[in-house]
Image: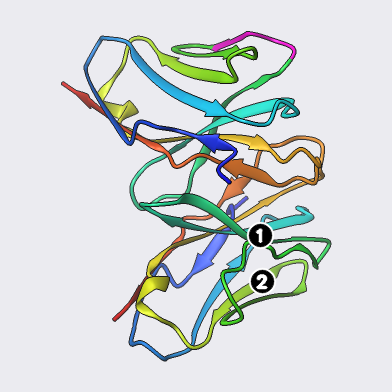
Amino acid sequence: DAGVIQSPRHEVTEMGQEVTLRCKPISGHDYLFWYRQTMMRGLELLIYFNNNVPIDDSGMPEDRFSAKMPNASFSTLKIQPSEPRDSAVYFCASRVGAGGETQYFGPGTRLLVL
Amino acid sequence: DQQVKQNSPSLSVQEGRISILNCDYTNSMFDYFLWYKKYPAEGPTFLISISSIKDKNEDGRFTVFLNKSAKHLSLHIVPSQPGDSAVYFCAAPSASNTGKLIFGQGTTLQVKP
């Protein structure tokens, strides 16, 4: 299996621009998670989906952030408009079922907003 | 409210010695704990876990100790190797058992040759 795939790996944009991050989970996994990693706060859960349905978006910082999962093999995290404080590494992770706790992470997207 | 805390941002040890990474938690309902390891430019990968009904779990050079009364767990790496240099995160499933993990801030371990 190819593992969780994220694109792009790096993104540099200017403040005010729209940013779209993409994720392809491992085939057969029914849970998908979006995290943000910063030095100050470590790994923060932004939102997660179960069977393509958003379950908990309480970690989404504000309305500028939105996430979708149109099908079982694709999810996007969008920031519009982006701000410098959004600069971070964004990870997508997936897992199967709610019993076992191991999540499988993608390589991350490093976002820099100038 | 940080339910899982790693108070040491970094740790440096000599190759061959023991590395001890610490993690504290506040929620006594957590019934499972995990450690993840993260190399630069990669996503975190699962390393080892422990159930709350145990006080120790060992896997090769890695051992997790759990002290429920102190709400504290630690990861021991013996002997430490330069390839162990990475960021280590402890995590716990949210009490509602929804599949959601709560992570600590991470500890950067540097093992010097």
Q: CA distance from mark 1 to mark 2?
A: 8 Å
Q: Position of residue A102 (x, y in %)?
A: 66, 38
Which amino acid type is shown beneath numbered disc 1? Pro
Q: Residue at x 45, y 55 (%)?
A: A37
Q: Residue at x 57, y 80 (%)?
A: A78
Q: Position of residue B83 (x, y in %)?
A: 30, 28
Q: Which comes before the other along the chain, label 1 or label 2?
A: 1
Q: Is residue A84 left or right of residue B99?
A: left
Q: Which residues are magenta?
A: B53-58
Q: Is residue B15 above or below residue A99?
A: above
Circle 1 SS class: loop
**Disc 2 target residue:** A75
What is the quadrant of the C terminus of chain B in the image?
A: top left
Which amino acid type is shown beneath numbered disc 2? Ser
Q: Is residue A34 above or below residue B98?
A: below
Q: Are marks 1 and 2 in contact (CB under 8 Å)?
A: yes
Chain on which label 1 sits: A
**Disc 1 target residue:** A25
Q: Is residue B81 above or below residue B98?
A: above
